[in-house]
Image (tube, coloured by chain):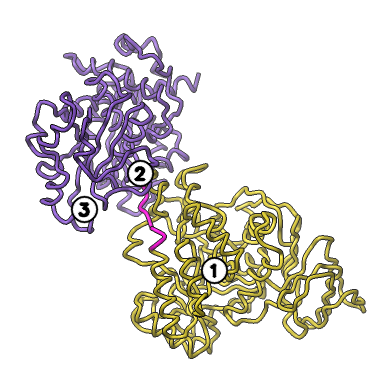
Amino acid sequence: MRLLLKNGRVIDPANGRDGAFDVLIEDGQITRVEPNLPAEGAEIFEVAKGWIVTPGLIDLHVHLREPGQEHKETVATGVASAVAGGFTAVACMPNTDPINDHAGITQFILKKAAEAQLAHVYPIGAVSLGSKGDQLAELGEQKAAGCVAFTDDGRPVATALLMRRALEYAGMLGVPIVNHCEDPSLKGDGVAHEGYYASALGLRGIPGVSESLMVERDVSLAELTNGHVHVAHMSARQSLRAVRAGKDRGVRVTCEVAPHHFTLTDAALEAPVKYDTNLKMNPPLREEADRDAMLAGIADGTVDLIATDHAPHHADEKMLEFDRAPFGIVGLETAVSIVFDKLVHAGRITLKRMVELLSVNPARVFGIPGGALTPGSAADLTVLAPDVRTTIRASALKSKSKNTPFDGWELRGSVAATIVGGRIVYRNAQ
Amino acid sequence: MTTRAADLPETVERAHPTPGAAARLRSRHLLGITGLEADEIILILDTAEAMKEIGGRAIKKVPTLRGRTVVNLFFEPSTRTRTSFEIAEKRLSADTLSIATATSSVTKGETLVDTVRNLEAMSPDMIVMRHASSGAPELLSRICRSTIINAGDGMHEHPTQALLDAFTIREHKRRLSGLKVAIVGDLLHSRVLRSNLRLLTTMGAEVWACGPATLMPAGIGRLGATATTSVDEAVEGADVVMLLRIQNERMHGHFIPSVREYFALFGMTPERVRRAKADVIVMHPGPMNRGVEIDSAVADAPYSVILEQVSNGVAVRMAVLYLLAGRDEGESE
């Protein structure tokens, strides 16, 4: 099996490449990245003019819902959604039912992923048994089974003491602790960002500080333990400040931002559709100053990576009163177009930085394969079409759930093809 | 089908329409004061004047909504508002049905949307609803054929309360514009505050919102109020003082240390009322807690219009029902 990607512009920051290169793939591995490679019997993938070949995109924050909530998503539909969004690998959160706090569940997820044969799946295990915040889960065994990081996502790591122990223990294993940072007492039963719009709509507020307070705690604990904390779905400007301060003094802290948090604000709750439950997520859409801070952090490098927090929910579950509907939106199939349109074409970041945010840094932060087109590595690549205009259609999503606030958005920039292990697993029909 | 201009009692024709009143309401629902323009508010208040006259007759009934079915769907306990709507509906000859949570399907795990779709299958014309979730009427208005009237949703809006408050103020002051209105109490959780704030600022009144810092909504200035934690400052020179209920459960959420302290700092006493204008009126949407937000000496004083608010509620709700039903006719013609 030989595949030759002809005439593409290769952007491979890890190897310092940006230019016209052909990529030769043999038996699922990248073997040569050079200009003008001869076909020599290989199948040719003609990369159109203006398209870009990058190391496969990696999403570190995805909810695949299996086991237990297969009506929202399964591993199979989740990875189909991933490759349609340009992602060759995803890391999946442990808040399934049961919670992924044992090797058996990790093995089950990996078996489902192997059957689906689309994107690579890297399970993230629970920090504590049942994510209850009491007893540390068997992180060593979980790592041996395939977990690449640990989190109690959906909830914060409950106490400072548990976070300290988790950072120490995971540090020993060489993996990060991912935290959903949120002070539960300040969050209360809030459903929207605390501010003018929540007040106007009569929705209970969640202040940005409920997030940053725990980011500050975790930065201090990472400093104490020399562990690695990764801040999930950062949304508040105060959190960015805390991460920046931590990085400045050498603390092992990294962070991610989701596309909705650098695109939308809480103003969307009021118009065009009031109380749209597809705008309900946790952390909530925040105000303009926070959204702008996320944009600045992405541009200046404080933000390490973009992750979608892909959170599928069935339409019935979202067709409820705003305060009763579940938090979360799908994101795998809309991320690339949003990053192109709102970041690259808006002049905020370069294409190289885009590849760092979506591929190089995710691989580095979790220490997983990928992020580089190095001969000898697995042939996971994404072909991007920066100028192809696309209209997002919720009904056309490959994900089992269609809960996106971006339905009908017209964006410039799209995925052209996704290649995993040398196989073209997705090709954009447009 | 039943309501035509010719069918309307003479009295519904406004004897002296206020300049600037709209001819009809623009929306088929009443979801909040948000979305109503000043001319529509004037139309409702003018119409309510005519309706009030009906309530003063020996036979308090007109055939205006004969043949119309109105469902009062209350997912939250309410005595005053539900009774007021029921009386308004009966005075307009509508067929009415009231459903309270305890007897509905919601306790069996049915969703709000399904409950209302089932009701709609029986072809009601209007649904008057109260619900604990902000935005619930908005959700139903997107899927319902019936006209939705919001009788209070969570912490969001309670439009007929604000309209009856405005009606009562206008009866006493002959105007809304230029008045200083002090609203004192639990601002954070109050849908009455939000509806009143929108209505009064739309009509050109100056609203002062006063309460403990723990019960002050974020961004209240942008909502149109001048916010203060000083009762004296709020009441100083006010034409209207409106009190909001302090619910007992607020005592347990770090909001207020005690009833005693709340009354000492914010309770409306005759001494505090003295800072207002000599012809001040004091209002309360009820149910009131004597000795918490209001001293009995104020609640029962000559300047208290609390019971007038209750009577006016019926007239205002008749006006809303009438105007929304009449609007339907316009649509189908």
Residue B220: image x %, image y %? 35, 44
In the image, A244 versus B9, the foreground residue is: A244
At 63% from the left edge and 51% from the top edge, which residue is drawn? A393
Distance from disc 3 to disc 1, alpha carbons, whole Å, reads 37 Å
Q: Secondary structure at mark 1?
A: strand
Q: Secondary structure at mark 2?
A: loop
Tell me whether marks 3 and 2 sit on the same chain.
yes
Q: Residues within 10 Å of mark 3 (few under 14, many from 20)?
A: some
Going from N to C along the chain, the mark reached first, 3 or 2, is 2
Distance from disc 2 to disc 1, alpha carbons, whole Å, reads 32 Å
Residue A320: image x %, image y %? 42, 51
From the rendered image, report the letter of the chain displayed in purple.
B
Residue picked out by circle 2: B220
Residue B311: image x %, image y %? 19, 25
Quarter of the figure with the N terminus of chain B: top left
- Can you name the residue that lies furthest to the left here? B297
Residue picked out by circle 3: B250
Is mark 3 in CB contact (under 8 Å) with mark 1?
Answer: no
The question of residue A280 being in magenta is answered with no
Q: Residues within 10 Å of mark 2 (few under 14, many from 20)?
A: many
Is mark 2 in CB contact (under 8 Å) with mark 1?
Answer: no
Q: Quadrant of residue A383?
A: bottom right
Q: Chain A in the picture: what colour?
A: yellow
Q: Chain of mark 1?
A: A
Q: Specify start and end residues of the magenta stretch as a single range.
A: A202-209
Q: Chain of mark 2?
A: B
Query: Is A302 drawn above or below residue B55 in the view shown?
Result: below
Query: Is A217 drawn above or below residue A185 in the view shown?
Result: below
Amino acid type, callout 2? Ile
Residue picked out by circle 1: A256
